[in-house]
Image (spheres, helix red, strand yellow):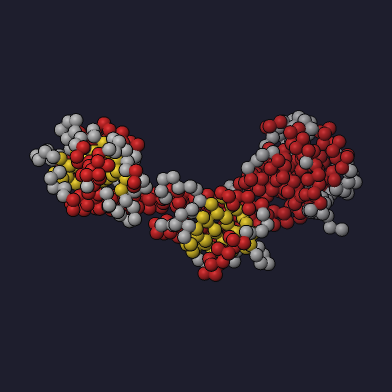
Amino acid sequence: MTDDLLHFADEPEGAPSREDEGGWKILIADDDREVHTVTRLVLRDFEFEGRGLQFFSAFSAAETREIMFANQDMAMVLLDMVMETETSGIEVARYVREELGNHFVRIILRTGQPGQAPENQLISRYDINDYKEKTELTARKLFTVTTASIRSYRDLLTVERARRGLAQIVKASSRIFELQSFPAFSRDVLVQLSQLLQVVGEPGDRPGCGVILRAVPGGGWAVSAGVGPYAGLERSETVPPEIMEVCARALQERTLVFLDHRFVGYYKTRKGMEMLLYFENGRPTSRLEQNLISTFSINITTALDNLHLNQEIIQTQREVIFTLGEVLDTRSGETAHHVRRVGEMASFLARLHGRPEHECELIRMAAPMHDVGKIGIPDRILLKPDPLTAEEFTRIQEHTNIGYNILKHSGRDIMQSAAIIALQHHEKWDGSGYPQHLSGSQIHLFARITALADVLDALLHPRPYKHAWTQEEVRAYLEEQSGVQFDPGLVDLLLSHFDEFLRIIASHPQPE
């Protein structure tokens, strides 16, 4: 017993017990060193939920504030009412609750001077959890109050983590419900899941990692997205067998399965598209985390259904747009699949220009409608094989305004973009175009891109009034018109990736 007392007496001031690192943190704040010794001795074998205690010692109010500032995960403070002054304990409690904003640590106020009890309103205001005279705290009562305090601290943390977790689910769900591509959706699910677990986990937890797999038509699975060490799998055509082995259980049970330090989930849309989620958390998943992940998982399923439905709508819109564009092109003597090639090349050029993916997809959909206004031009002018008169050329120029007026009334981004392209795709960089004689950056980027893609495809294919130009002739013309008809920066991008544009054209050949 004497050795134990000497051991505790030799602890450096403010230092935690070296034996119990990782245990529940308890601060003994008292100017009486014997109180520290006795408290440590009585509670040295204490354990709650498999964790012991990590002791800290402070011998003044100032030192107590410093330790609390540096250890805001303190579970309990045994706080002397009287240290430097008769109200030191109350001042420390005020500091902890009001200045630090720490409402989780349990404060047990102690005094060796009967009659120094704090006023009731102060106990309530600073959430002082118990008040004891030191003579009351026998070994049994000290053990009991410590157990109650740490249990209360744990429950408060659980409630707070649940609150933060639910708030994170709301935030994460609003993100994954945004309309986006499936790979982007997959990455967002993994990122938001990792953030959710960090919000409700222990301080210092490392971010989780995982992959999302998508069923391949005809059988098998492919990696749609990965985070952490699995990020590189996005470029892989094969799924590591160890991942598929773990996913087999979720696939068999068609549900969310927790397996020690990882979990897997199976998802299927109403239209039959299947997805697997594999995630490693690096530690066993707590009951609270399992409940929150299950809640988030329900939102994943709903968002996946919405995404799949939206993609079907977009695909239907795309087919309607392409069909309409090709009908108009057929009427005006354009080559088959012209509008599809223009849309693909415009999207690729926008990507080379550094535009965000949603803008690249937007111009892919909008560019094919650039000549929709030709529906209002008489056949005798539109199909005339001979050179147009000045009056006829003026009339055919009206297709830009006609197209704009047809499309501008919709509030959809696709139609608004298409309206701008229809109006401005015959404007020229030097201001000599029509209908508004805009120049340079006054011309919308989408219109500048579409104009270049439109002319490139037109020159490389035959028309009733001309033969197809050679690649050399096309390159020479684009270089000549750089800074005159076309945006010089866009021309440079196109010419430096000329072979890739030719491959896009070749992927949509004219019928024989």
The residue lying toward the viewer, choosing from 488 and 332, is 488
Report the label total.
0
Could you say where residue 45 lies in the image, as x and y percent from the top left? 27, 52
Vertical arrangement, residue 201 with respect to residue 472, above or below = below
The residue lying toward the viewer, choosing from 345 and 114, is 114
Q: What residue is rendered at 59% in x and 52% in y?
A: 230
Vertical arrangement, residue 231 with respect to residue 68, above or below = below
Residue 119 visible in this rendered orientation of the protein? no
Q: What residue is rendered at 48% in x and 62% in y?
A: 259
The residue lying toward the viewer, choosing from 275 and 201, is 201
Could you say where residue 179 lies in the image, as x and y percent from the top left? 57, 52
Q: What residue is rendered at 71% in x and 31% in y?
A: 440
> On the rendered image, what quadrant is the C terminus found in?
bottom right
Q: What residue is rendered at 22% in x and 52% in y?
A: 143
Could you say where residue 363 lies in the image, as x and y percent from the top left? 68, 45
Quadrant in the picture for residue 295: bottom left
Residue 452 visible in this rendered orientation of the protein? yes
Instruction: State left or right for residue 127 relative to residue 50.
Output: left
Could you say where residue 204 lies in the image, as x and y percent from the top left? 44, 45
Q: Residue furthest left?
A: 115
Instruction: State left or right for residue 24 relative to residue 504.
Output: left
Q: Residue furthest bottom?
A: 252
Vertical arrangement, residue 171 with respect to residue 316, above or below = above
The residue lying toward the viewer, choosing from 97 and 470, is 97
